[in-house]
Image: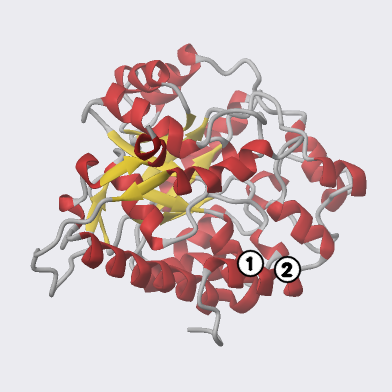
Amino acid sequence: MTGKLLTIAEWRRAAKAKLSPMAWRYFRSGADAEETLRDNVRAYRRWQIWPRVLVDVSERDLSTTVLGAATSMPVLIAPTAYHKLAHPDGELASARGAAAAGVVYCASTLATTSLEDIAAATAAPKWFQLYVHRDEALTASIVARATAAGYRALVVTADTAVLGRRLGDERHGFQLPPELEMPNLAAHLPATEDRASALAKYFAERHAASFSWRDLARLRASTTLPIVLKGVMRGDDAARAVDAGCAAVIVSNHGGRQLDGVPATLDALPEVAAAVAGRAEVFVDGGVRWGADVVKALALGARAVLLGRPILWGLAVAGEGGVRDVLELVRGELSRAMALAGAPNVREIDRDLVRRREAMLR
């Protein structure tokens, strides 16, 4: 473990000291008043674990599978942009840290490393997150590249018809430093443009605001990769995604960075899980800060959680080793929480293990 950073909050503080003010604002910020950003974390405090006693927990098994791939614990690395803002090794360090911890890494369309180089960094299973563009040829080319590179799933982001408003980025004029690019998109930038300053603007102008269920069906038919629909918050949308052939859904509000005022993801999770009813896998991101939070998410219907900002904090502080150490911190907390809750393996974590805090006050 790096130094004596014993909690995600301590990693966050250490990362703030390492990051440039611009990078810190970009990574930590949410949309508008940041109500949803804060509530994602608070939601986990609204649930309590009701432990079972006299259970043999001398050995704990944290392992599970996600879309058929073995993982050492029910934690994945969420797709987040611009890792080289946090550390020079960027996404390569993040992917290698994930592989060292035995978890799946999900690469972002907005990576500062090419999807091919990320795929080649380790032999461990990886997923690729896709933003659908107005330019259908561009979208198709990215899907083809991800398939050829060996990614195991396509994570289609559904909650970015337009970009959320992050006030800090607007106020301070966020842009990538001149030395950084988004290589998954750079080839499509007009040659006359200044690549470092124009890439973010180029991408923002090319989001497919018209992307619909009909388009998702066409995408599903065009690829052999399983599709994971990210950004689902409603049960009816989750059921429709499964009917459309999605292998999984991610309950996500984009880390509170899109529409402010939507529910915390943990609050939306039970409705989504009930609607899916075991026909596909359900994941959740946003607000996970303790191993006990993973227990709560699994109890409410998630197969696994995705970590976003905590991974960036580890990356900023110590590169690949920091990513690994943050994951190992969560692993230790999760193992301890399972032991104390009377759940020797993840299959024993069910809805009966948690209760909403308000129920105690009636």
The quarter in which the C terminus is drawn is top left
Rendered location of residue 82, percent (x, y):
67, 56
Instruction: Name the residue that disc number 1 marks.
Output: 12
Rendered location of residue 108, percent (x, y):
56, 48
Q: Nearer the viewer, residue 97 or 354?
A: 354
**Which amino acid lies under the numbered mark 1 shown in the image of this protein?**
Arg
How many numbered marks does the figure carry? 2
Tell me: 256 left or right of 8. Answer: right
Q: CA distance from mark 2 to mark 1?
A: 6 Å
Instruction: Judge the density around disc 2: few (<14), some (14-19), many (≥20) Cα neighbours within 10 Å.
Output: some
Could you tell me if the residues under marks 2 and 1 are in contact, i.e. CB atoms within 8 Å?
Answer: yes
Q: Nearer the viewer, residue 87 or 109?
A: 87
Tell me: 75 left or right of 208. Answer: left
Q: Quadrant of residue 268?
A: top left
Determine if residue 122 is in view: no
Looking at the image, is 313 positioned above or below residue 231?
Answer: below
Instruction: Name the residue that disc number 2 marks.
Output: 16
Q: Quadrant of residue 317?
A: bottom right
